[in-house]
Image (cartoon, rainbow, N blue to C red):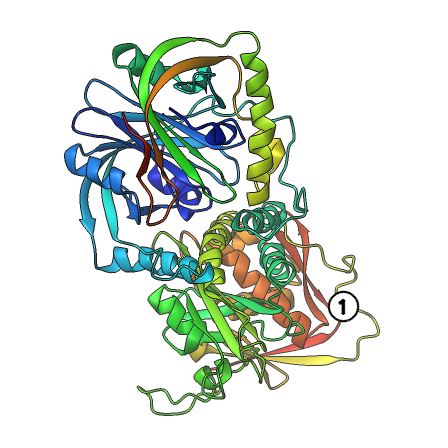
Amino acid sequence: MISSELVPFFESGVSIGVATRDADGMPDVVRGLGAYVHADRLHLTLFVPAAVAETTLSNLLRNDRVAATFSRPTDHRTLQIKGRRVALRQVEGAEQERIEAYLPRLAEALCLLGMPPRITRRLAHGPAWAIDVLVESLFDATPGPGAGTALVRR
Amino acid sequence: MNVRLESLARCFRGVLPSKLATCSADGEPNVAFVSQIDYVDSGHVAVSCQFFNKTRRNLGESPLATAQVYDPLTFEAYKLRLRYLRSETEGPLFDTMSLRIDAIASQTGMAGVFRLLSADVFEVLSIERVEGFLDEAPQQERLDPSFERAGPLTELRGLQAISARINQAVHLEELLTGVLRAFDEIFRFPHGMVLLPDETGERLVALASHGYGGSGIGAEVRVGEGLIGTVAQQRRLLRVSSVDGELRYGRAIRGRVEEAGGKALAPEIPLPGLPDAQSHMAIPLLLQDRLVGVLAVESRDPLCFAEWHEAFLEIIANQIAMGIDAMLDDGEAEAPAAGRAPGAMVAQDAPQRRQFCFYKNDDCVFADGEYLIRNVPGKILWKLLNAFQQEGRNDFSNRELRLDPSLGLPPIKDNLESRLILLRKRLEQKCPDVRLVPTGRGRFRLELDCNVELQERESA
């Protein structure tokens, strides 16, 4: 279960990488477009832009394993979740608003590194897929001696 | 889509973190943010392994990996399919990567904690640009040289500022002076110069200087000699801090007894330098393994240059090298407009008489008994002056210079543009009444406000 104090981190302007793999063991990674933690704190939904998620989708249709890493650009605080895809669907209703709210937050963080918001704003963000994930484990992946510490294990 | 690894140079500079996906033996994916992926050669990259224990464990079990890298200027994304080959814990690749990480670590007070464990080498199986990663840019969007928002100086901001200068420069001279000016504005490096290799590749010639009142243009440095020459030879950045009188550009180069010849050579044009400089830094400008030039800065502040600048400037040096190279390729680039309109060839009231003497043994031109210029720029000047005196011709083109075998320009990368800049600047400094005035793309006019007398001698 994801502890309640970590929820805002997952939903903030963090940089997100979503990893899947194909039948030959070739991993793939795609940039995420935000995420939110469900009320049960056992599930989490990831958004990925349809324009670049073809491999991710075909991987997830054949294999439910998924990993996602969330890293704050300004201080590199990083968490990684591992879990299983329980649903793969189109973005619904208010979820599109979450995506729209995520991008300016990411742009703000990247701007502190010097990436102009006018470029960040161009990250492809519609249409998007939603991946519902059952979180099985959670790791602190912040660079440093403690990297890889399990916060939640299945 | 076929993308060459070399064309992704900016992505391998550690400006934006890359994402690296791996997989365990039992098929569980993992994704790590990697501070830097390094270019090794056209078929290999290396990843710095510091803390990514899970990534390393996975690679031992299942060698396939995918990296997503980003161009820090355009934010375009590229996907590299990789196969892990080996982990190096010593050797040149490890040393290069370690140096950068140590620099960053010491800058952030993490020396010893944040260090390179190994350089993990991968074979690149395929490269693709991630189509659709970014939406179309609004029309005519250009890099804005002024930062969009004030903020701390970051690698990205510096890179953007320098890149903007490079992109806006329409000719080589503007590019070089623009870069040096940007260094002053962004880093507070008030004294700098850029030197480019001559046609022999044995010497570097100063083509631009900043903070020395324009002096030193045309100064030569032998490859291997002094700080700048050493940087050119070793192809490595050198930083010398808190120097006393022992290390001076001038001392290292001027009056140096040549070991081979055993006689002291006083250069015709001294390299500019602060007599009381306390720190120096020189950076090789490289494209793959080709030396495009050397950028040298110095300061009276013994602590002006930090490790962080090294890491930072290596990123920017690559950008400058690409800019210079592109300009050298464009032989027909628009030259800067001179301050004067083309006027009469010889002014009616020109009592001034200049004597030019050409020494054949070393292609050296003296004006009124004083050294002016040598080698290819010397031969070019001699050709122009003779054409003027014998044929009354004063309009010339870059193309005819390229086609003249007596000038000895190489067939490709002929550096003609930089030779002409050097000649024009030397004339401005030493014989302002003899000018090369651009008259259009790849064309220029020889303007004389004096009468000239030409002499040729075998040797001095």
Query: Against B152, is B215 above or below?
Result: below
Q: Is residue B363 something one can see in this rendering?
A: no
Depth check: give the residue in front, B166 or A100. A100
Query: Against B448, is B171 above or below?
Result: above
Q: Is residue B228 left or right of residue B216?
A: left
Q: Is residue B34 left or right of residue A65?
A: right
Query: Against B95, is B432 above or below?
Result: below
Q: Quadrant of residue B259?
A: bottom left
Q: Residue furthest right?
A: B349
Q: Is residue B132 left or right of residue B441?
A: left
**How many numbered tags mark residues here?**
1
Q: Residue at x 26, y 42 (%)?
A: B53
Q: Residues within 10 Å of mark 1 (few under 14, many from 20)?
A: some
Depth check: give the residue in front, B434 or A149. A149
Q: Quadrant of residue A82?
A: top left
Q: Residue furthest bottom?
A: B263
Q: Residue at x 33, y 14 (%)?
A: A85
Q: Residue at x 24, y 52 (%)?
A: B118
Per the image, the residue denoted by label 1 is B346
In percent of width and height, residue A5 lies at: 49, 31
In percent of width and height, residue B152 lies at: 61, 52
Query: Against B56, is B369 above or below?
Result: below
Q: Quadrant of the N terminus of chain B?
A: top left
